[in-house]
Image (cartoon, rainbow, N blue to C red):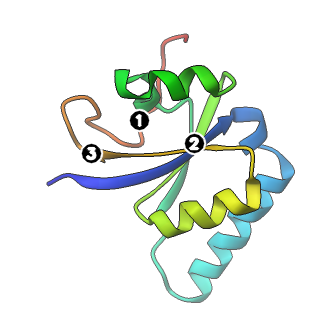
Amino acid sequence: MAQTYYFLAASDRFLQGHQAQEVLEERTRHYLAHSKAIDFWLVRTPAFLAVPEFADLRHRCPAPAAAVVSTDGQFILWLKHRLQYVLLGQFEAPSAAIPDPLAVHTAAR
């Protein structure tokens, strides 16, 4: 059964930067303190960006790209407000185009 995944994408350098890492670490601590399962992942060079439906987004996002992927759309929106210079999207997976939502794209872009 397909699940909706929400994401924000930015350059890998931006999402590996101090501000983004601090926000993600803070959120991880919050989840753990409240016994909430982690439902977000940092994916470097995400394979889902290679699908045709994300061609425009892929061209607007500095390479190499990274994404924070979550099943919680509200979390992604919250994160966008903290990081600002990111692109948002969503997709259904698994699907024929995106069999694994957290897969890493291994070919050069």
Q: Residue furthest bottom?
A: 34
SS type, badge 1: loop
Horizontally, is 97 left or right of 68 in the view? left
Q: Nearer the viewer, mark 1 or mark 3?
A: 3
Q: Residue at x 55, y 60 (%)?
A: 76
Image x and y of residue 93, in percent: 27, 45
Q: Is 10 situated above or below 59?
A: below
Q: Amino acid at mark 1?
A: Ala
51 relative to 93, above or below: above
Q: Quadrant of the C terminus?
A: top right
Q: Amino acid at mark 2?
A: Ala
* Residue corresponding to mark 3: 93
Badge 2: how crowded within 10 Å, few (<14), some, or many (20+)?
many
Q: Which residue is mark 1?
A: 103
Q: Secondary structure at mark 2?
A: strand
The residue singled out by tag 2 in the image is 67
Nearer the viewer's eye, disc 1 or disc 2? 2
The answer to whether the residue labelled 2 contacts the one labelled 3, judged by CB atoms less than 8 Å apart, is no
Q: Where does residue 38 sit, x and y in percent of width and height?
A: 49, 69
- Compared with 70, 97 (above or below) is above
Which badge, 1 or 3, comes first in the chain's sequence?
Answer: 3
Q: Residue 11's image quarter?
A: top right
Estimate the x, y position of residue 15 in percent, counting from the top left.
72, 44
* 98 horizontally vs 50: left or right: left
Q: Residue at x 65, y 61 (%)?
A: 79
